[in-house]
Image (spheres, helix red, strand yellow):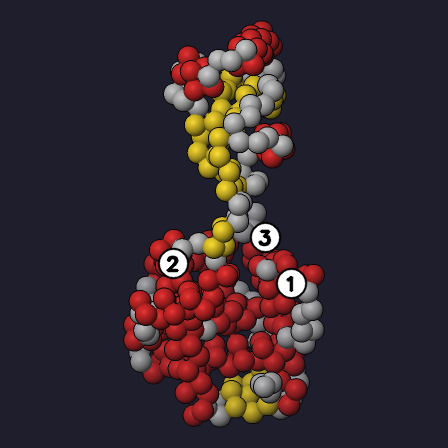
Amino acid sequence: MVKTAIGVFLACILLLGCSKQKEETSLIVNGKKYSRQQIAKAALIFKQNMMNALPEHTLQSVTSDMRPIVAREIITNQLMLEEAKKRKLQVDSNLVNKALEKFKSKYSSQSDFENELAALGETEDDVKKELEKGALLDTLLKIILVNADTASEKECHDFYNQNSSRYKSSPRFRVSQIFFAADSSKNKAEWEKSRKNAYQLLKKLKAGMKFETAAAANNQSDGDMGWFRKGDLKEELQKEIEQKKIGEISDVICTDIGFHIIKKTDEEGERVLSYEEVRENVAKTLSVKKRTDYMSHFVDSLIKIAKITYVDTSLMPRD
């Protein structure tokens, strides 16, 4: 429900451009009417934004009719705003103005901003009012969530013990490197010099020179670069290190920044992380859930005393 507040405010902004039109009513919340067209538009953009935020869902089955979800968001939005007004909450006008400027910065010019609003039948003041509503929601959220519990140590331990299999580390490897910087596009002579130095050093390594000694001789300490996971390194280096056994040294590898000689010094397969390693993550996960549940119960309490009419019964909550 913490995320719901963001979605709620989003729905509020999305309804700009439709609010002044007289259209078929689908939902009435404490006397305020919402049209079928408003809800349909908000549902469409809500779904698009969800896809953008969670692109993996484009490969999964997603409920085609988002209208009941958006209807819940709209109801929550209005009831929360009414609650904020009952509590006579105030917003910082400076923060609202900053939010407005950030909103306008998405447009290339003030005239482009005004023209788009005009096409929707809206004005800059309309946008500012919606941003003020968003600021009110944020203020109310902070006040309400003060009373939400955080996860106890026992709850964190219990959750980890029941779900430890989901906390796994990715395979990783440790790498040492001797590097010769070069950029052929800027200085070909320097590039050629670095290339020759790299191959000369590789010859010494193959003859038995210790990697750490060679690294130190080139002002690179012992060459240790630490641990890496797949995807951390440049593709050329990643491919080479994956083919090596612990202790093996690569040939000279040329990349866009110079010449590399690398050595795999250790590797570690997938493993279940200890509680100490993931405690912070577990605590955060559980605390967010507690805040979400707390907020959900609060909204439910507002809905119970509100007068809500589903003119379009297909918008009613689904079990």
Residues at marks 1 and 3 touching, judged by CB atoms closer than 8 Å: no
Can you say whether 127 is above or below 299 in the image? above
Q: How many marks?
A: 3
Quarter location, residue 49: bottom right
C-alpha distance separating marks 3 and 2: 53 Å
- Closest to the camera, between mark 2 and mark 1, is 2
Residue at 49% x, 51% y is 271
The residue at the point 57 percent across, 47 percent down is 108
Q: Mark 3: which secondary structure?
A: helix
Q: Residue 63: image x %, image y %?
A: 67, 73
Query: What's the amino acid at mark 2?
Result: Tyr
Quick check: 140 left or right of 176?
left
Question: x, y percentage for residue 313?
Answer: 64, 90
Q: Please give the residue where the numbered disc 3 appears in the rendered image.
A: 112
Q: Is residue 191 visible?
A: no
Mark 1 to mark 3: distance in Å? 33 Å
Alpha carbon separation for disc pair 2 and 1: 30 Å
Which of the two residues, 174 or 58, is positioned nearer the viewer here?
174
Residue drawn 53% across and 38% down? 232
**Label 3: how many residues lie within 10 Å, few (<14), some (14-19) or many (20+)?**
few
Q: Amino acid at mark 3?
A: Asp
Mark 2 vs 1: CB contact within 8 A = no
Give the mark toward the camera: 3 or 2: 2
* Callout 2 secondary element: helix
- Quadrant of the rendering where the C terminus is positioned: bottom right
Q: Check disc 2 and report the residue beneath it.
A: 275
Relative placement, left or right, of 143 versus 12 is: left
Lower position in the chain sequence, tag 2 or tag 1:
1
Q: Quadrant of residue 288?
A: bottom left
Query: Could you tell whether 28 is left or right of 273 in the image?
Result: right
| Residue at the image point whose x is 60% and y is 68% from the top | 46
Residue that carries the numbered disc 1 in the rendered image:
57
